[in-house]
Amino acid sequence: MTAHRDGHRRRHAPRSLSAPIREVVVATLPHWPWLDAPERARLEAIAADLLHRPSWEPARGFVLDDRIRGTIVGHAALLGIGLPPPVFRNVTAIVVHPATMSLTGPRPGPMPGTVTDEPRPVLGHTSAHGPVFIAWDVAREQARHPERGYDVVFHEFAHKLDAEDGTVDGTPLLPDRAAVRRWVAVCEAEYRDLRAGGGSVLLRDYAATTPGEFFAVVTEVFFDRGAALREDRPALYEILRDYYGQDPAERWPA
């Protein structure tokens, strides 16, 4: 988790959602009832941008419809409503698979210093410069059960926020050096605890894979189980609250 230079964000023209897509967002985003009017307007603008600006690519002959697109953009946009605009400008393509996909190619193995090329089932995938891949069956199911604290859309789009400086390293763009130092101190301590077999019981083992995965996993928990995270790891909750500009534990009684 490394320090970042402050990022400069340009303003962009707001967009609006069509009525059918808006209906999907309202129906499939459990957080919607707890957002105020400005937050809803901001969410709609971000969702509309994600709907129209990046390319959408169905995988393996899959057919995309309003419910699929609306569910994905609604959940993704929630992450950005408290961030300075524009957000997700590094999202250039969204690839939707009908079900769990397989990751192939060489990658670090299960033991330090080893490499494996065994296919690995994945629910989503992205990189600093690549498309966002989402498994629709998983995204749909997780959207119905926010109390579990798993959300593949939150996870993959958190990686894109992390990657705004070109690297996925667990530290997103922050407003100043003091915020960076605070972020690194808190996250590195929590990450070390997880690697040592401790840490928050709310974070699944995958959070200990890399600092980038730690940020993505804790983002899932922050939005869907904010009150529990605030009670269990208040310092971690506070830095996420300050970064995202949102306080899920206060607005949503989940």
Image: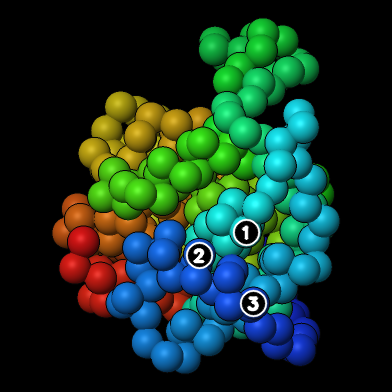
Label whose residue precedes the other's in the sequence (3 or 1) = 3
Spot occupied by residue 2 in the image (x, y as percentages of width and height): 62, 54
User: Residue 149 versus residue 25: which sits nearer the camera?
Assistant: 25
Q: Is residue 91 above or below residue 41?
A: above
> Which corner quadrant of the image does residue 70 belong to?
bottom right
Spot occupied by residue 9 in the image (x, y as percentages of width and height): 73, 81
Residue at image location 37% in from the left, 80% down from the top: 35
At label 2, which amino acid type do we have? Val
User: Residue 147 versus residue 10: which sits nearer the camera?
Assistant: 147
Q: CA distance from mark 2 to mark 3?
A: 10 Å
Residue at image location 44% in from the left, 37% down from the top: 207
**Pointer 1: residues within 10 angstroms few (<14), some, or many (20+)?**
some
Residue named by callout 1 = 66
Q: CA distance from mark 1 to mark 2?
A: 7 Å
Can you tell which mark lies on residue 208? none
Q: Are marks 1 and 2 in contact (CB under 8 Å)?
A: yes
Residue named by callout 2 = 24
Residue named by callout 3 = 18
Residue at image location 19% in from the left, 68% down from the top: 253
